[in-house]
Image (cartoon, rainbow, N blue to C red):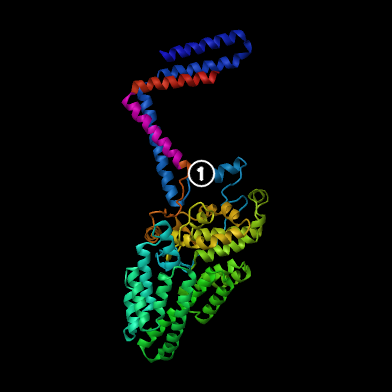
Amino acid sequence: SICSFLLAAVARVQGCLLISNSKLKPIFSSFCVSSTVSMFLNTLTPKFYVALTGTSSLISGLILIFEWWYFRKYGTSFIEQVSVSHLRPLLGGVDSSSPSLPHQRHVSYPLRHHHPRFKDKCKVWRNPLNLFRGAEYNRYTWVTGREPLTYYDMNLSAQDHQTFFTCDSDHLRPADAIMQKAWRERNPQARISAAHEALELEDCATAYILLAEEEATTIMEAERLFKQALKAGEGCYRRSQQLQHHGTQYEAQHRRDTNVLVYIKRRLAMCSRKLGRTREAVKMMRDLMKEFPLLSMFNIHENLLESLLELQNYADVQAVLAKYDDISLPKSATICYTAALLKARAVSDKFSPEAASRRGLSTAEMNAVEAIHRAVEFNPHVPKYLLEMKSLILPPEHILKRGDSEAIAYAFFHLQHWKRVEGALNLLHCTWEGTFRMIPYPLEKGHLFYPYPICTETADRELLPTVFHEVSVYPKKELPFFILFTAGLCSFTAMLALLTHQFPELMGVFAKAVKCIGLIWLTL
């Protein structure tokens, strides 16, 4: 057989070597041992190989099941944990399980104001920085032929308009009665025609709002219409303010007029911001927040933060954050990432990953990295847009906190502010992925974290145009190497066991051939 021929050749080579050089006696003794081993292996039957491969497959399968159970319960591989915790110190190694940079300690921060057991509800919020339909969204449609807004998003806006701009007493004023029907119209041209019809009866603030949002093709034209709406809205607000305590009907009317006035002033401030009059926009926003401090549902402070960043007035940005970045208030990507940008600004111009690896992180660098981890933990989709690893699209009119829609809305307006701070994007690039190594697994085991909403992806698919945009999903924790290795080993040994059972003699010849090749390799 082939194995006998190979063994004879090995024996002849051994004899020649021993004759030519008497100093190779230790090698000869090892050859004798190998010959004895080969004689023993030649006596093994195919049944032995079947039993061997079957047993090894069973053992590796049991190890795989245990490793998978341990990973599901504790979030790490048992073999990896033992090797890192017990074997590496004995071998003189260092612990390399730091989150993102060498010498970086594990950080935790009081980010959560909810208990982990309470599941998030996927509440959809009005986008504080939503664009104008006529002057911006429609322009995109004219150029590309694509619809930037989904039907679900526009339907939510229609519901918002009916909530904010209508009330039960609209039937008392003919123009408001027409506008009440206009906000329910699905056809844009029907809404615009109804607004013109209402203006023929009287100066109607909500009619001007609709025309400014949907008919105006430029920001300057929208601003002109909003100024007319402001004049009409202030008159209605003053009249309803005097009658607000005369009954429930008048209270509802005053609440509606208040919403209309706040909306108009805010959109005027946004027009000023878009037309380059940023200081004027900041003043208008500050006055609006002082005049109506309780209307936090509009999130005017996020508009203010973006305008202050454009002016590079970082001291005022910090003052606004000190007021709104509170544990008792709802978080947002604007709040978390603006705080991270300010911390990064203090160290990013001199930050170097190589230098940080040698000397460790300074206190200021550690604070910046912690702020970045805090922001990424809140919304993990933002960094890919800021680092331009993913293409931006026009933001929707509604966003989902911690979702891809919020990440698009934030990055669309704030990417320029990150680029303006030297080294900020480099620091973000070096540290943001380390966040996922710090989050406990399963997430319910953490004390300062609560689970990422599982409904986010579904809601984002409704808000974002999936035809030309791939929705981002929460990064999944990768399986440890040892689980993958054990799974591969189990599959390989199971395949060998099956082949040995089906073709015992052929697999026996194959095993002897492998054994002979191994012996030849050892002798050379």
Q: Residue 360, percent across and down?
A: 66, 52
Residue located beneath label 1 in the image: 80
Specify the quadrant of the image occupied by residue 467.
Answer: bottom left
Quarter in which the C terminus is drawn? top right
Query: Residue at the spot x=48%, y=69% of the render?
Result: 219
Q: Quadrant of residue 308?
A: bottom right
Q: Secondary structure at mark 1?
A: helix
Amino acid type indicated by mark 1:
Glu
Q: Is residue 46 above or below residue 16?
A: below
Q: Position of residue 246 (x, y in %)?
A: 38, 92
Q: Is 503 or 265 nearer to us in this picture?
A: 265
In the depicted structure, whether residue 299 falls above or below residue 70: below
Q: Quadrant of the N terminus?
A: top left
User: Dot 1 surroundings within 10 Å: few (below 14), some, or many (20 or more)?
Assistant: some
Image label count:
1
- Up the image or down, 72 lies above or below 512; here it is below
- At 46% across and 83% down in the image, what residue appears? 231
Magenta-tinted stretch: 483-503
Position of residue 283 measured from the top left corner of the image (x, y, whole percent): 57, 76
The relative height of residue 349 versus residue 230 in the rendered view (above or below) is: above
Residue 490 covered by magenta stretch:
yes
